[in-house]
Image (spheres, rainbow, N blue to C red):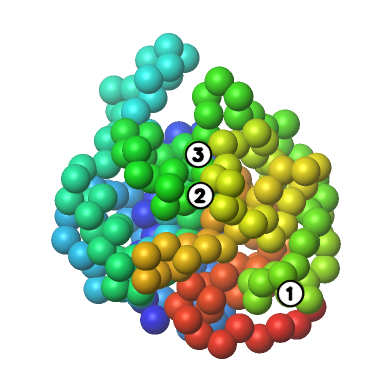
Amino acid sequence: MRNLILSGGLYHDFPATSAALAEVLAEVGVESEVTDDIAGALAEPPEVQLITINALRWRMDGDRFAGERGRWRFELPGPARRTLLEHLERGGGLLAMHSACICFDDWQGWPRVLGARWDWNRSHHPPLGWTGVRVLGGHPVVDGLRDFDVVDEVYSDLEVHPGVTPLAESNGQPLVWARGVRRGRLVYDALGHDVRSYDSPVHRELLRRAALWLLKRPVGISG
């Protein structure tokens, strides 16, 4: 199975986290290609079964981003939007990591696909550090997994779609969910700020299961 990882952006070591994610997914037979040319990679439908968004690319309209805007400002072109939707329509999987909820803010349909968005007037996160993650169960991606601790950021007060059912949370903040979109499947995992997040054996198992579920392959249930 082939996976395209859309990577890159500010404030994160995306080359390192994308490599770590590719390593985890390889453990269940997923071969990943990483690119930071998001628009180019989605200009035509890629021949992959899974698309992963591990990036922070958005319009950067706030004054505090003025110094970086010239290099990093990004709008998702129409053909790229269509590629993502057509991928889901064909039954493909979409794995969205961490800052994907901030991405593509020029596209009004993206929060409906993802199930949430970052609200610049309300959303925030505590300082990067150890946090406890409570696994809620009720889905093959998380059934049987134990609660775990991880070094990460806890995205808080996202604008979450009312139809979203959290599969894991921290301090009352939903961190992981899985949902059907068109004929495909989506998993959002708000964890993954840096490579330490991928040091957690439970988080790694969650991601392996997420990939299997997204690819409509059997998900083994183990702790």
| Residue 13 appears in view | no
Question: Which amino acid type is marked by label 3?
Answer: Arg
Q: Residue furthest top?
A: 63
Question: Is 150 or 222 nearer to us in this picture?
Answer: 222
Q: Going by the image, does 157 lie left or right of 36? A: right
**Residue 30, image quadrant:** bottom left
Mark before the other along the chain sequence, 3 or 1? 3
Task: Check disc 2 and report its element: helix, strand or loop.
Answer: loop
Q: Are marks 2 and 1 in contact (CB under 8 Å)?
A: no
Q: Position of residue 109 (x, y in %)?
A: 35, 44
The residue that mark 2 highlights is 115
**Image position of 123 with respect to 200: above or below:** above
**Image position of 36 with respect to 68: above or below:** below
Q: Residue furthest front?
A: 162
Q: Going by the image, does 61 lie left or right of 101? A: left
The residue positioned 54% from the left and 45% from the top of the image is 161
**Image position of 1 with respect to 33: above or below:** below
Q: Quadrant of the C terminus?
A: bottom right
Disc number lying in front (2 or 1): 2
The residue that mark 3 highlights is 117
Task: Check disc 1 and report its element: helix, strand or loop.
Answer: loop
Q: Are marks 3 and 2 in contact (CB under 8 Å)?
A: no
Question: Is 64 or 118 nearer to us in this picture?
Answer: 118
| Residue 136 appears in view | yes
Question: Which amino acid type is marked by label 2?
Answer: Gly
Q: Going by the image, does 119 lie left or right of 112? A: right
Whole-angstrom CA distance, mark 2 to mark 1, is 21 Å
The residue that mark 1 highlights is 143
Question: Which amino acid type is marked by label 1?
Answer: Asp
* Structural crowding at the residue carrying mark 2, measured as other residues with C-alpha within 10 Å and reported as few (<14), some (14–19) or many (≥20): many
